[in-house]
Amino acid sequence: METAAVYPWLLVPAIFFARVFDVSLGTFRSIIAFRGYRWIALCIGFVESVVWVLAISQVITHLDHPGLVLAYAGGFACGNWVGISLESRVGIGNELVRAISYAGRGQLARFLREQGYSAINMAGDAGSGEEVEVILVVEKRKLIPRLIELIRQLDPDAVLTITDVKSIHSPALPAAPAGPALSGGWRKRARRK
């Protein structure tokens, strides 16, 4: 540490990359914690905290050197970008794809099922008597680009929306018994209005 005291500018790249590492871990941890991966988030949070303490201690010790403060702030900014990029590459979790097809006429769901997807088909009405096909498919995030490609093959004009799925409950699992909170309390409040 004597070298750091004499030449604090040597710490600039170390602080920058430590912050990139720690903030990218924090961003990744936040996103996967939201998706329900608590144990992974716990482990990442531990490593993130250790790196943060080491980085901030060096900046505070050498606060009279503005280059360290700039490296700390720059590492924070870059770390957010790296963390989001990392999470999108890893692609943890599932997403729900909704496809509204004006041209499918029932063929899009059949086509997706032939490709191995569990596609749910619902008839829809776009107004003026125009029928549409609404398809729902839950798929792993990593595999969404392939699903979109298949939908576009059959109907290039289909309207697609994609939303995150936090958890999936299988119909094969037994239903949880209704507790007192579900005994109609909200209905009683609604009737009072």
Image (cartoon, rainbow, N blue to C red):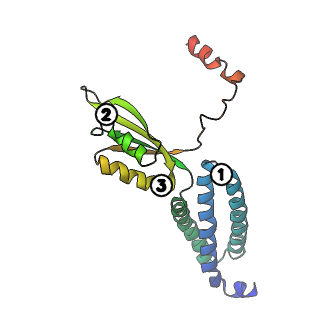
Q: Which mark is residue 143?
A: 3
Q: Which corner quadrant of the image does residue 174 belong to?
A: top right
Where residue 6 appears, as percent x and y from the top left, is 70, 88
Q: Residue 132 carries which label?
A: 2
Q: Local crowd at mark 2 within 10 Å, few (<14), some, or many (≥20)?
A: many
Q: Is residue 4 left or right of residue 99?
A: right
Q: Residue at x 71, y 56 (%)?
A: 42
* Disc 2 secondary structure class: strand
Comes first in the chain, label 1 or label 3? 1
Q: Which corner quadrant of the image does residue 54 belong to?
A: bottom right
* Disc 3 secondary structure class: helix
Mark whose residue sits in front, 1 or 2: 2
64 or 185, nearer to the observer: 185
* Residue type at the position of mark 1: Tyr
Placement of the N terminus among the 4 image quadrants: bottom right
Residue furthest toward the right? 2
* Residue type at the position of mark 2: Val
Q: Alpha carbon of mark 2 to alpha carbon of mark 3: how far?
A: 25 Å
Q: Name the residue under label 1.
A: 37
Mark whose residue sits in front, 1 or 3: 3
Q: Is residue 193 left or right of residue 173?
A: left
